[in-house]
Amino acid sequence: MPSYVIGGGYNLLFDDEGFRGLIIKNSVRGLALVDQGGSVEAASGTNLGELVEFAADSGLEGFEFLAGIPGTVGGAVFGNAGAFGQAIGDRLEGGALLKPDGEEFRAAADYFRFAYRHSRLKIDRAFLLEAKFRMSPGDREKIRVKISENLAVRAKKHPPELTACAGSYFKNPARNGGGRSAGFLLEQVGARGLVVGGAAVYPGHCNFLVNSGNASARDILALAAELKKRVEQNFGIRLEEEVIFLPAVPFQRR
């Protein structure tokens, strides 16, 4: 049976027809200090917020940038989640994985081939069971201050937590972006306030597409296509989706 594993499901857009297969939601949680030097092990279903809090309570710095990012450890590693110029892959030492055929194995950080919002897990479909991260001892008070600052920045720009939204829709352009973010480019082409059916561009940040009440996946895809077209016509830059669209009938590998 076709299957797809999800963590929090925050970067997913499901087909209006649903998914013709099995959706497996990973809710296996657990956190542990491996040594006093700062290594932390996390089960892949652990909420990212729990990992940030655990590190802060343990006086370990390095995960403050993850504060406020929804989802799980597994999902974050899968997409190499990040903010403020940092990514979770920068801190990964290795992990325990499960191959699609059921074989378990351990891998070091270089196995994952991290890139911007990308990891090898998107290609070979190995499933992360547990991750080991290297942290650095720090001052608890300073760590908490940094977390609060990051949360405040996100609160100003991002939709409220319960908004029906799949997160940043497009990746920031790489080499041809000239340092300009996807949100900036979208704002320049008049994305703010654009609506297709029940889908709308969030007024506070043009790289968030929200469900204004009755949006279909088709509405979201149509709005995204219009935004991509405008940016390409005006800047010659083709935006790439960060949100994953999961079709009703998944592609079958031979």
Image (spheres, helix red, strand yellow):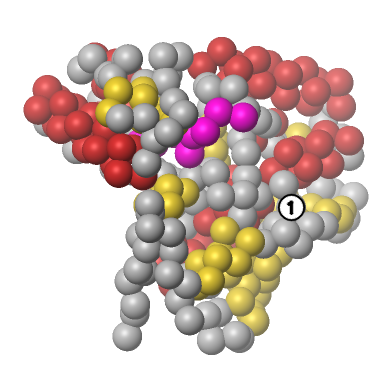
Q: Amino acid at mark 1?
A: Thr
| Left or right for 239, reference 236 | right
Asked if residue 222 is positioned above or below residue 140 in the image, the reply reads below
Q: Is residue 137 visible?
A: no
Image coords of residue 95 (percent x, y): 66, 66
Q: Per the image, is 60 magenta?
A: no
Residue drawn at point x = 15 percent, y = 32 percent? 229
Out of 1 and 253, give the one closest to the viewer.
1
Q: Which residue is mark 1?
A: 46
Image coords of residue 42 (percent x, y): 76, 56
At label 1, counting other C-alpha atoms closer than 10 Å, the crowd grade (few under 14, some 14-19, many 20 or more) is many
Residue drawn at point x = 62 percent, y = 29 percent? 162
Q: Is residue 220 visible?
A: yes
Q: Per the image, is 164 magenta?
A: yes
Residue drawn at point x = 45 percent, y = 76 percent? 2
Residue 51 position by quadrant: top right
Q: Secondary structure at mark 1?
A: loop
Residue 205 position by quadrant: top left
Report the span colored magenta: 162-170
Residue drawn at point x = 85 percent, y = 26 percent? 139
Image coords of residue 26 (percent x, y): 67, 62
Out of 138 and 160, give the one closest to the viewer.
160
In the rendered image, the quadrant that contains the C terminus is bottom left
